[in-house]
Image (cartoon, rainbow, N blue to C red):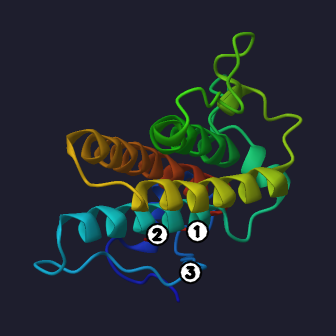
Amino acid sequence: MINTGHVAPSALGQRYGDRVDVTRRVEPATRRTEPARGTGDERELLDGWLEYYRAAALDKCAGLSAEQLASPSCPPSPLSLIGLVRHLTEMERAYAHRIADPATPLLYCTEGSPDGDFEDIETADVDADLETFSEHCVRSREIMADLPLDGSLRWNYLYLIKEYARHLGHADLLRERIDGAIGE
């Protein structure tokens, strides 16, 4: 679907130096919908928003090559789409998996490389990183579903939602810079 609204394509082309087709719109790989207003209890809403954002993270990566996913946004910043996915995997470990096992170590970030999720991507296996992210989301769902929604679990839900919301804004910009794709 072509984006023909909002801002005239010629104005966008001038703004971005005609380096990408800024009218290109990519449809999400998955059909995701925001949780409905006024329906469901608190737990359903927390689960709904977290699932929405998890799906959005994968959608931002859909259709890109490994090189595109690993390309840094604007050097010297190491920020890349696969770096964001790896960071979100770390957040799933830190704020969901550690509920079940507080000794769960981080996967990409180590004492020797505290920002390994973003910085150590030159050797990243992009397909494995995407699969790892998906597997971590499944495990997080299982852990969180088995617990009562108390103040501590509520905080973890909200923290994860905050992390996704924050970094999906970065993902929007990264994706647009890579191939001009815009979209939800």
Q: Which residue is drawn at 73% across and 57% down?
A: 130
- Please give the residue where the numbered disc 2 appears in the rendered image: 10
Residue 110: x and y in percent read 70, 18
Q: Which of 143 and 68 is in front in this view?
A: 143
Q: Give the foreground label among 2 and 3.
A: 3
Numbered disc 1: secondary structure = helix
* Quarter occupied by the C terminus: bottom left
Residue 62: x and y in percent read 68, 69
Q: Which residue is drawn at 58% across and 68% down?
A: 59
- Please give the residue where the numbered disc 3 appears in the rendered image: 30
Q: Which residue is drawn at 60% across and 64% down?
A: 58
- First of labels 2, 3 by sequence position: 2
Label 1, label 2: how many angstroms apart (C-alpha)?
27 Å
Left or right: 81 as drawn, with respect to 164: right
Dot 2 amino acid type:
Ser
Please tell me how crowded label 1 is: few (under 14), some (14-19), or many (20+) other residues with Cα within 10 Å: many
Numbered disc 3: secondary structure = loop
Label 2, label 3: how many angstroms apart (C-alpha)?
30 Å
- First of labels 1, 2 by sequence position: 2
User: Where 103 sits versus 36, above or below?
Assistant: above
State whether residue 13 appears in this view. Answer: no
- Please give the residue where the numbered disc 1 appears in the rendered image: 59
Dot 1 amino acid type:
Asp
Please tell me how crowded label 2 is: few (under 14), some (14-19), or many (20+) other residues with Cα within 10 Å: few
Left or right: 78 as drawn, with respect to 137: right
From this viewpoint, which residue is outermost toward the bottom? 1
